Image (spheres, rainbow, N blue to C red):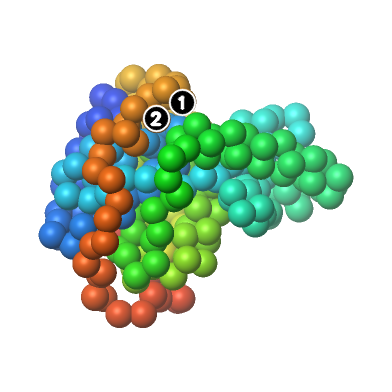
C-alpha cells in the first residue's frame, strides 16, 4: 500500500484515528488489551474513547542472537512459545531459544508484579476484546498475544495496529476475527520510522495509565456468537 498521510505525529494521533474506526463497539464495554509498553498510551486513549476497560496482555519477543530487536518468536506470561519461520530459516538452535524464553519470562513476571499488584488480570472470557499495538514488524509478539487471549475464550477478538507491512498483516488476520490497520506500507523497516515522535514508554507511565481506569466489574457480554477459528476480516485504511 502506498503511504499518503505521511508519518503519524505521535502515538496519540494514531490512537485517535484507530478509535474512530472502533466507534461501533461503544456501548458494549469492550476490553482493550494493550501490549506493553509502547501500546499502553494508545490503549488508554482507545478505551476511553469507546467506553471500554483497559488492561495489558503480557508477551515478549524472542530476539535473534545477533540482533535482539529482530523477533524470531515470542512468549506469553503462561509460558506458551511461538517460534516464527525466521528462527527456522536462521537455524537458531533450541538451547538459545530456551535460554531466551527463560529470560523473557522473567521480564514478564516482573512486569505483572509491577502493573497489577493488587488484582488479577481482567478475564476476557465472553468479552469483546481488542488487542492493541502501536506497530508490528514480524508479527511474532501480536500473534502470541492473540493466541494467549483466544485461549481464554473471548466472544470476539480484534487486532488493532497503527502500521504493519502487508505480509505480516495477513498473518495477523488469520489469528483474529477482525484486524484493523491504518497503514500497511511495502517500504517497512521499523515501526519508529512511521512516527515523528516515538519516545520510549516507561514502567511508571504504564502503571499510571492502568490506575487511571475504572476498577473491573461485571459487564454485559458481547453477543456476536461463538469465537471464529477461521481467517478473520482485515481492514486497511485507504
Number of callouts = 2
Q: Secondary structure at mark 2?
A: helix
- The residue under label 2 is 207
Q: Residue at left 34%, top 70%?
A: 126
- Disc number placed over residue 47 in the picture, else none: none
From the top left corner, tell me how far across and down residue 225 is, in percent. Answer: 30, 80
Q: Residue at left 23%, top 51%?
A: 52
Up-down: is 144 above or below 112? below
From the top left corner, tell me how far across and down residue 206 is, in percent. Answer: 39, 30
**Contact? badges 2 and 1 (CB < 8 Å):** yes
Between residues 81 and 68, which one lies in front from this camera angle? Answer: 81
From the top left corner, tell me how far across and down residue 170 is, in percent. Answer: 45, 59
Up-down: is 176 above or below 116? below
Q: Secondary structure at mark 1?
A: helix
Between residues 182 and 45, which one lies in front from this camera angle? Answer: 45
- The residue under label 1 is 203
Q: Quadrant of residue 63?
A: top right
Gap in angstroms between the C-alphas marked 2 and 1 = 6 Å
Extreme residue in the front direction: 118
Q: Quadrant of residue 205?
A: top left
Residue 206 in the figure: left or right of residue 111: left
Q: Residue at left 84%, top 49%?
A: 94
Residue 183 in the figure: left or right of residue 60: left
From the top left corner, tell me how far across and down residue 109 is, in percent. Answer: 60, 39
Up-down: is 178 above or below 79? below
Amino acid at each position: 500500500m502506498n503511504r499518503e498521510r505521511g508519518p503519524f505525529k505521535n502515538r496519540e494521533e494514531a490512537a485517535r484515528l484507530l478509535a474512530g474506526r472502533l466507534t461501533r463497539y461503544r456501548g458494549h464495554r469492550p476490553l482493550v488489551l494493550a501490549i506493553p509498553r509502547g501500546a499502553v498510551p494508545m490503549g488508554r486513549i482507545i478505551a476511553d474513547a469507546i467506553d471500554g476497560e483497559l488492561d495489558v496482555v503480557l508477551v515478549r519477543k524472542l530476539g535473534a542472537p545477533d540482533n535482539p530487536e529482530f523477533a524470531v518468536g515470542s512468549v506469553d506470561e503462561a509460558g506458551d512459545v511461538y517460534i516464527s519461520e525466521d528462527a527456522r530459516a536462521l537455524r537458531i538452535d533450541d538451547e538459545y531459544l530456551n535460554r531466551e524464553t527463560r529470560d523473557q519470562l522473567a521480564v514478564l513476571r516482573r512486569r505483572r508484579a509491577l502493573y497489577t499488584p493488587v488484582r488479577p488480570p481482567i478475564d476476557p472470557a465472553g468479552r469483546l476484546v481488542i488487542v492493541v499495538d502501536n506497530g508490528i514488524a514480524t508479527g511474532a509478539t501480536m500473534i502470541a498475544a492473540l493466541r494467549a487471549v483466544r485461549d481464554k475464550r473471548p466472544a470476539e477478538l480484534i487486532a488493532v495496529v497503527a502500521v504493519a507491512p502487508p505480509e505480516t498483516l495477513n498473518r495477523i488476520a488469520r489469528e483474529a476475527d477482525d484486524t484493523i490497520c491504518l497503514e500497511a506500507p511495502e517500504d517497512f523497516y521499523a515501526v519508529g520510522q512511521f512516527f515523528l515522535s516515538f519516545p520510549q514508554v516507561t514502567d511508571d507511565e504504564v502503571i499510571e495509565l492502568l490506575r487511571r481506569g475504572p476498577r473491573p466489574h461485571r459487564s454485559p457480554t458481547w453477543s456476536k456468537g461463538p469465537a471464529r477459528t477461521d481467517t478473520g476480516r482485515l481492514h486497511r485504511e485507504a
